[in-house]
Amino acid sequence: MYGNISVTDAPKAGEQYIEDPVKLAEFEAKIERGEKIEPTDWMPREYRRQLIRMIEQHAHSEIIGALPEGTWITRAPGFKRKMALMAKVQDEIGHGQLLYSAAETLGKSREEMLNDLLSGKSKYSNVFNYPAETWADTAVIAWLIDAAAIINQVTNAKGSYAPYSRALERICTEESFHLKYGYDNVVTLATGTPKQREMVQAALNRWWKPIMHFFGPPDKASQHTATLMKWKVKMASNDDMRQQFFESYVPKIWELGLTVPDPNLRKNDDGVWEYSDPDWDEFKRVINGDGPCNKERLSVRKWVEESGAWVRNALLKPDARYVTPLS
Ligand SMILES: [Fe+2]
Ligand SMILES: [Fe+2]
């Protein structure tokens, strides 16, 4: 809670948070000068709310994102690949830990965040509601989903909230290892037997739409986005990040002799990539719980929460009070 209102409650329709104009001006000047905001600094309620929403969703995406790849640990082809995948999945859970801590500095407890994940109140990245059907899917996820995540996270690391930036810097270093690991797996399959090539192409076909969805729908210029950009909460538009992804990775996909399942994908003379709109209705359906794996993902998390409850209870000291971490 923050004052009398929950830190995550949006103002009611037609209402706006009224902030102290002097404090707001100082806050905005600080960001304008390129300085970072620390947890103990004054911040507008909408800034706090948006950051909690964003960092919390990111944390959930890390721990739920570990699930589709995690199911392949026992089936990885060979010991070396099993070790590498295990290390990657462990990293992703670690990213979740770092991000929950960063979100907690804003006043929402980890328990509340996990409860909101399980109740469906807070979301995670849609992309993790799709199944990893073959080993090649894990290769495509580790290369291209992690690549998309890096674009997003490198951009957000330049944002104004210090604990989130610090967490992202470390996360990005580890993500770049994941990307190399994924690329190595894709190259192995793409330069392997005809069957392996077929597998990796089929996986790319399956994952292309979720990857396009990953960056979110095209931005409409709205007052909302403009304020978040001014406060350095949102650092780039969805379209800019999608274009960056095309620019960096489509040539590499083509270089491997793979086909992107979008006949309209091309780079125009002005340097802008043209692409087919990926079914945004499906995107909305999956966000609202109707994707191929939504129920499975949440039921695994629920099972983990329930079966680990005795450990958390055993560690609880009766007189321990919840303390918000500072960073
Ligand atoms: Fe991660
Ligand atoms: Fe990763």
Image (cartoon, rainbow, N blue to C red):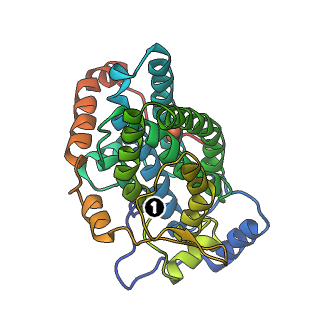
On the picture, is 231 further left or further right than 105?
A: right
Q: Residue at x 52, y 59 (%)?
A: 51
Nearer to me, 27 or 230: 230
Q: Which residue is mark 1?
A: 3
* Residue density around tag 1, few if under 14, some if 14–19, many if 20 or more, within 10 Å: few
Measuring 37% from the left and 20% from the top, which residue is drawn there? 315
Residue projecting furthest to the top = 79
Q: Residue furthest bottom?
A: 14
The x, y position of residue 256, in whole percent, is 55, 45
Question: Can residue 324 be seen by looking at this rendering?
Answer: no
* Closer to us: 134 or 327: 134
Q: Quadrant of the C terminus?
A: top right
Amino acid beneath label 1: Gly
Most distant residue in the front direction: 194
- In the rendered image of this protein, does residue 48 appear above or below residue 275? above
Residue 297 shows in the view: yes
Q: Quadrant of residue 317?
A: top left
Q: Callout 1: helix, strand or loop? A: loop
Extreme right residue here? 33
Q: Quadrant of residue 74?
A: top left
- Look at 40% across and 72% down and name the residue there: 277
Residue situated in front as seen by the camera: 83 or 314: 83
Q: Position of residue 105 (x, y in %)?
A: 54, 47
Q: Looking at the picture, how far across and down is residue 2, in whole percent?
A: 46, 58
Q: Residue at x 76, y 60 (%)?
A: 35
Is 87 placed left or right of 317 in the picture? right
